[in-house]
Image: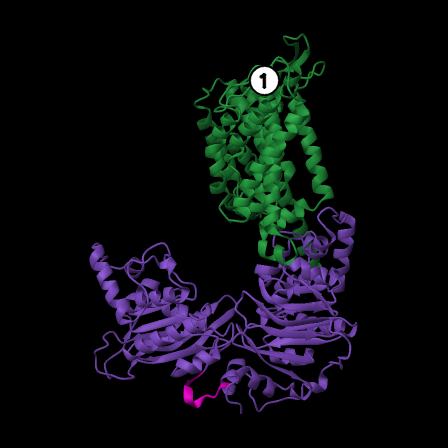
Amino acid sequence: MENSEVLQLRGICKYFPGVNALQNVDFTLRSGEIHALMGENGAGKSTLIKCLTGVYVKDGGTILIRTNPSDAPEAEFDAAHIRSPQDAQNAGISTVYQEIALCPNLSVAENMFIGRSGAITNWADMNKKAGEILSSLEIPATPRQQLGSCSIAVQQMVAIARAVDMKCRVLILDEPTSSLDEQEVEKLFKLMRDLKAKGVGIIFVTHFLDQVYEVCDRITVLRDGCLVGEYVIEDLPRVQLVSKMLGKDLDDVADIKGDSDVQAVDTSKTPVLEAHGLVSNAGIKPFDFNIYGGEVNGFTGLLGSGRSECVRAIFGADKVLGGTVKIKGKQVKIRKPIDAMKNGIGYLPEDRKHDGIVADLSVRDNIILALQVMKGFFRPFSRAKAEQMAQEYINLLDVKTASSDTPIGQLSGGNQQKVILARWLLTNPDFLILDEPTRGIDIGTKIEIQKLALKLAAEGKSVTFISSEIDEMLRTCSRLIVMRDRKVVGELKDDDLTRNKVMATIAGGEET
Amino acid sequence: MTPATNNKNAFVSGLRSLTRKQLFIPIAALFALIIFNLIADPSFFVIKLGYNSANQPVLSGYLITILDYGSELAILAIGMTLVTSASGGQDISVGAAIAIAGSVILRVLCGTDSRPDHMKAPIIVAFLVACVVAMIFGAFNGALVAFFKIQPMVATLILFTAGRSIAAWINNNELPIIAEPEFSYFGTFIPGIPIPTPVFIAAACMVVIFLVLKFTNLGLYSQAVGINPHSSRLNGINPAIVKLITYMILGLCVAVVGLIKVSRISTINYSVVAKDIEMDAILAVALGGNSLGGGKFNMAASIMGAYIIQFLTTTLYKFNVDSTALPAYKAVVVIILVVLSAPVVRERINKAKKASAKKSVKEAA
């Protein structure tokens, strides 16, 4: 029975309008293993999970699941027809999501038994049962305790306990560790190992490489909706895992430095911005950062490694908990975005929809917004002045819009991004932070934005660039700060700026 | 080239018809009410010039009543529009807050004497004190919404419940009466001017809000905060302060209406004054085609909505609808209007229009 297969996904396909989200993906889970599902954003991890849990209905392929775990290994698999989350639960597949989907105002025991078929109406009985499960899994919570009073990690464990008690054979953990601290993660891993010993098959989705290498037995890598491969953990060094996720072969190193326009930066002057021991409430380790006039540097690392959190701390977008910031040698306090803006910093945020555009407002209002706020509440631009500034930047960046009156929400992603870029160029910042400025936009606009970053640097401005595409970073940046697991793990410049070196530093651990 | 320009033209005209549509519902409602009254009884539109008990010329008639009482609503609609835009919710405590503001005015004017021979303070002082008090209560509501992130309706439910008791407590539960005639000018007529004073007060408020929207960024900030607070924050706006300010502006509007209300009868009835007025003010915003979920707003449409609500109320009174049954009749009309202006219904109507246009083209062919 040890290591017998409990779940087989064969040739799973899922189409969304215009996108093949999953193409012929196979996935196999054995009982008593922790199996990491890895891939960059948009690789199809969450789509695969959602097909498996019935949130989406797959468009092709079969899901085979062993109905009775006590069967001999050679027993037949049943094709499971999973069309709703309830079907998945009945088939023995339980899921714990990143956001805890429990009721914080109910007790721990109530949360474990709520909404279950054959509901327990005897409270004493329910609490006793819950207590048994909690102690058997060594979860530090009492059945009568209100769930909201437990730490996030314990709540996460209760969610797992609930899933386990439903006699699941397949447990899916979708980014369970992203809101936990190190000790909490340790506790969670202990629970995962206990469950593994009990024969549960666990699918573990995470962005943290160290965690994968700590608990997992096998890794399945997806990229662009396709299966890259399934590997036993010992056979796949970190660097190779990163290269498989990013789709770049390590041996295939083109000479990118040759065609780069990156110029030497005069580091003898005072940096435009210098930060020491900066730390915010977004869960990053304290970091140092500096940038000189005429320089383009960048933060690199996998998604969730803390790249955006670092620049948000510099801009005052998250709550800054400590550290010092000097602008041109003078110490300043940046507590909120307006402070940063007044010190000549601009920030194009990572999530355009959520943090960038004001969808129902016109292109014109979206362009002038930041400059208008800096100018002051009682000094609005005249309509004519606003229109003139908006038109200037619409022409300069070639924004495709019917008029400056069009609500920005009606523009394509690339044009929306140009409008947000226009907003910050209009404030004429000394230091512009571009967080994933090229994500989800067409190739033409991508190159325009890269060129723009280099042009700003040539004019003596400073630009910090963040991108998931290493090639893009190598083309634009003269210095790269490498992040892993929410801390800065290295800084690369000059001859170290090669794809190999960057990937090796991102991967960390043993270097090849 | 051609398809691009075609697209552009279609887009521009589509946009134009969209802005037209926001005013379409209130205007259509107004026409429906006018036509109904014309058919039912044209005497509705008669305006007479007469003389009141003080032998001063005054205009009277249903239209004058609409302008008179609609002005109170219009002033409230100004504040309610801003609150709705920035916080995506409504303040339901305005009726109770009017009682407080009115009570404060009487308290300042009368002191401890409930029937003074002459006023103990200038009216302007009493009004300014009421403004400050109403803005403090507005700030209380605003703080609950902006800093404690409580649902606006729930946050303002507190003052909705407690407001009238507070108003009574301010005057020790007495009903002060002001004998001097000049106090009544604000809610009735100024001698020699036949048009009700609230109309002028409302006009002044409209001019002020127009200037404020033109010469400050209040409109841009409240809409930006209402549409996307995250992005507003990253552009240097403090969403909490903007929300707080809109509630305080509504407080100012409340103080103005409080003055009109107590001036009308030279005294106050704590449990009845401005009763249910918050619902009419909210309806005015909705009837103007503004989303009650916040964001973009059209101030002129809200003000128009206020007068239309009053038109409806007055029409119902005219036809002797019992005052206890009035809300039921009003509700029916309001349901129709609000459902018609709901985006879902508008979309369907547009689709149906398109389909029938296609059909007629086919039949013609």
Regarding mark 1 in the picture, which secondary structure is present there? loop
Q: Is residue B304 visible?
A: no
Q: Which residue is mark 1?
A: B266
Q: What's the chain of the residue with tag 1? A: B
Which quadrant of the figure has residue A459? bottom right
In the picture shown, does residue A352 fall above or below B258?
A: below
In the picture shown, does residue B228 fall above or below A235?
A: above
> Residue B266: x and y, percent?
59, 17
Q: How is the image coloured?
A: by chain
In the image, the segment drawn in magenta is A229-238
Residue at image point 77% right, 59% down: A392
Closest to the observer, A228 or B73: B73
In the picture shown, does residue B355 fall above or below B127?
A: below
In this image, B212 relative to B28: left or right? Answer: right
Residue at image point 62% right, 51% down: B224
**Amino acid residing under circle 1:** Ser
Residue at image point 60% right, 16% down: B178
Seen from this angle, which residue lies furthest front? B112
Colour chosen for chain A: purple
In the picture shown, does residue A220 fall above or below A85?
A: below
Q: Is residue B41 visible?
A: yes
Residue at image point 32% right, 64% down: A141
Query: Is B331 a magenta residue?
Result: no
Q: Which chain is green?
A: B
> Residue B358: x and y, percent?
56, 48
Closest to the observer, A272 or A483: A272
Which quadrant of the figure has residue A105? bottom left
Q: Residues within 10 Å of mark 1 (few under 14, many from 20)?
A: many
